[in-house]
Image (cartoon, rainbow, N blue to C red):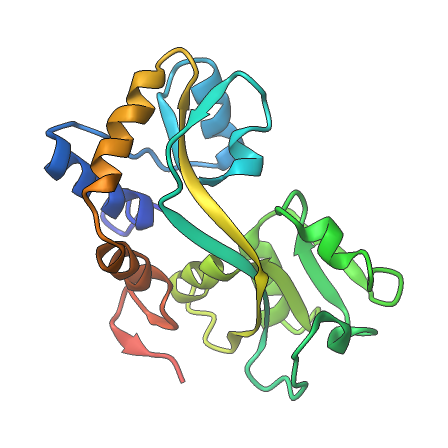
Amino acid sequence: FVDEQGRSSGIAVDLATILNDRLGTHIEVVSGAYSDLAQQVLSKQLDGLMVVSAQVALADPGQLVTSQPHLSTSLALFARRDEPTSITRKQDIKNKPLAYIEGLPNSVLWLADIQNANQVSPANNSIQCLKLVAESKVDYCLTLSSDQFYVNKHRLINVAIKYLDLDNVIPLFTAVRADWPELAEIINVGLQSIDGAHLNQIVGRWTDPYDALQGQAIS
């Protein structure tokens, strides 16, 4: 995302900074709508997409080459903090209004068992989905656990993760133009030099359940 000083910030920027330090490269992260950025990669205006799922990266066969997986996320249910339902399995939310992100990896299969019983509303993006919860228009938002980032950024202090589906862990990659596969190999060299604890620190800075921009706990 773009911060108050007009600079790109977030997980991808922190990861690119470390890769630049380790490799001596100059990877620059450009912020924007995913659909616009993807089109710019396919038209060779940009060189790649950072932190994307395999489903997204390989949606156009032969157009992109992926790095090794470097991060992961999982499907999650966000709800208002005062939502009393205890969720241990997805069937616990039957007959509850729910929003989900169209095109979200694994979401169609996840919803298949409960879709007829729920009031299911598609959302265009994660922010819209989470705000539907914050505004009490739905009880739950099915999205990615890493979207805690948007809860922090937009200060949705009444929204929290209520359920993590650890059976649906989704690996994340960097995807580069297919005509420059060497770039993926270079990125892999840099990724192999970063230990798991360091990667977790990067992710935690932006997705731990506190306001990362203000350093204040959300209660």
Location of residue 205 with respect to 54 vertically, above or below: below
Is residue 11 rendered to the left or right of residue 132? Answer: left
- State the residue at coordinates (35%, 14%): 180
Instruction: Tell me, yes or no, if residue 207 can be seen here.
Output: yes
Is 128 placed above or below 208 here? above
The structure residue drawn at horizontal position 27% and vertical position 31%, both measured from the top left corner, is 187
Of residue 170 and residue 16, the one placed in the foreground of this image is 170
Apparent side of residue 42 relative to residue 119 in the rendered image (left or right): left
Task: Report x, y in % for residue 111.
Answer: 76, 58
Q: Quarter holding the C terminus?
A: bottom left
Residue, x 38% and y 49% (percent of image)? Answer: 71
Q: Is residue 193 left or right of residue 42?
A: left
**Side of 1 where 92 appears, left or right:** right
User: Which of 32/195 is in front?
Assistant: 195
Q: Which residue extends farthest top? A: 179
Identify the image quadrant of residue 2.
top left
Residue 178 in the image: x percent, y percent? 43, 16
Is residue 10 placed above or below 155 in the rendered structure?
Answer: above
Q: Is residue 7 visible?
A: no
The picture places residue 211, in percent across and down from the top left corner, at: 33, 70
